[in-house]
Each structure stands twice: as structure tokens, then as C-alpha cells.
Amino acid sequence: MLKFDKTYFLLFCLLFLVEVLIALFVHDTIIRPYVGDLLVVILIYCFIKSFLDVRVFPAAIFVLLFSFGVELLQYFTIVEKLGLQNSKVASTIIGTSFEWIDILAYLVGIIIVLVIEKARPKNG
């Protein structure tokens, strides 16, 4: 089950860098909130696939459900309830506001993962 995959890890690192750059330097109404959410599910998926030899669909569904869970925590204002509202890091990572369109962004991100994985040539 444990297996390091350097391709997924490099993709994770690249996506992490893109997400950090978006968080630090992009302050618009499209890229930061929606493209960032779309990319974060791909980032989490690549992180999981970097270290675990799991099938595509279960990994993708897990990431999608995890993302929905984080969005649900935003609905219940978890950052404030934990007293982290003054933490820029916590507010950025967890998020502070629930939006239905974020759910759609996560879904589109996972669809992109599934399409790319389906199109990838299989080894062996």
C-alpha cells in the first residue's frame, strides 16, 4: 500500500507552489477563490498518490468527500469556533466562508483528475 511515486510528488510540489503563489499574490474574484479550489483537490489527490498505491476512483472520491467536509466546516464557521480567526494561515488553508460554487469547483477538479487518469497510458 505504501509506495513513493515521484511523478505524483513532483505534480504535488508544482501545484503546491502554484497554490502558494495564488494565495500570496492573486487577489481577484475568479482565480483565487475558484481556480484555487479546483486546483486544491488535484493537489490533495497528487499528495495521496505520491505515497499510497491506491486505485484512482477511490482516491478521487476520498479527496472529493474530504473537500466537501472542509467546506461544511466553513459553513459552521470552524475557524472562528477554534479561535483562529486572526490566523492568516488557518483562514487561508481552512477557509472562512461557505459557498455552493466551491462545491462545484471541487467537483470539476475531481472530474479533471478522472479524465486525465483515464487518458494516461497504463504501465505494464
Image (cartoon, rainbow, N blue to C red):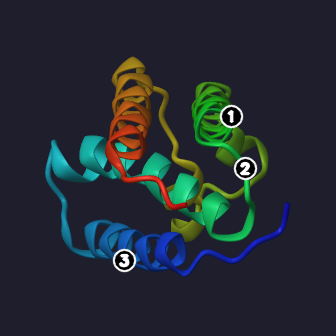
Q: Which residue is drawn at 44% across and 51% down?
A: 42
Give the secondary structure at mark 1.
Answer: helix
Please identify the quarter of the rendering in which residue 61 is found: top right
Q: Which of marks 2 and 3 is nearer the N terminus?
A: 3
Q: Where is residue 92 in the image (x, y as percent from the top left)?
A: 48, 59
Residue of label 1: 58
Label of residue 14 in the image: 3
- Which residue is located at x 64 percent, y 26 percent? 72
Q: Is residue 121 shown above or below 21?
A: above
User: What's the amino acid at mark 2?
Assistant: Val
For marks 2 and 3, give the one nearer the viewer: 2
Horizontal side of 65 relative to 118 (left or right) equals right
Number of residues whose C-alpha sits closer than 10 Å to that of mark 1, classed few (under 14), some (14–19) or many (20 or more): few
Q: Nearer the viewer, mark 3 or mark 1?
A: 1
Location of residue 21 in the rendering, given as x and y in whole percent from the top left corner: 28, 76
- Which amino acid type is marked by label 3? Leu
Q: Which of 3 and 107 is in front in this view?
A: 3
Q: Do the residues labelled 2 and 1 touch (CB within 8 Å)?
A: yes
> Is 13 drawn above or below residue 72 in the view shown?
below
Which corner quadrant holds the N terminus? bottom right
Tell me, yes or no, whether the two marked residues, 3 and 1, touch with CB atoms within 8 Å.
no
Q: Mark 2 points at which residue?
A: 54
Q: What residue type is labelled 1?
A: Pro
Q: Which of marks 3 and 1 is nearer the N terminus?
A: 3
Q: In which quarter of the image is the C terminus?
A: bottom right
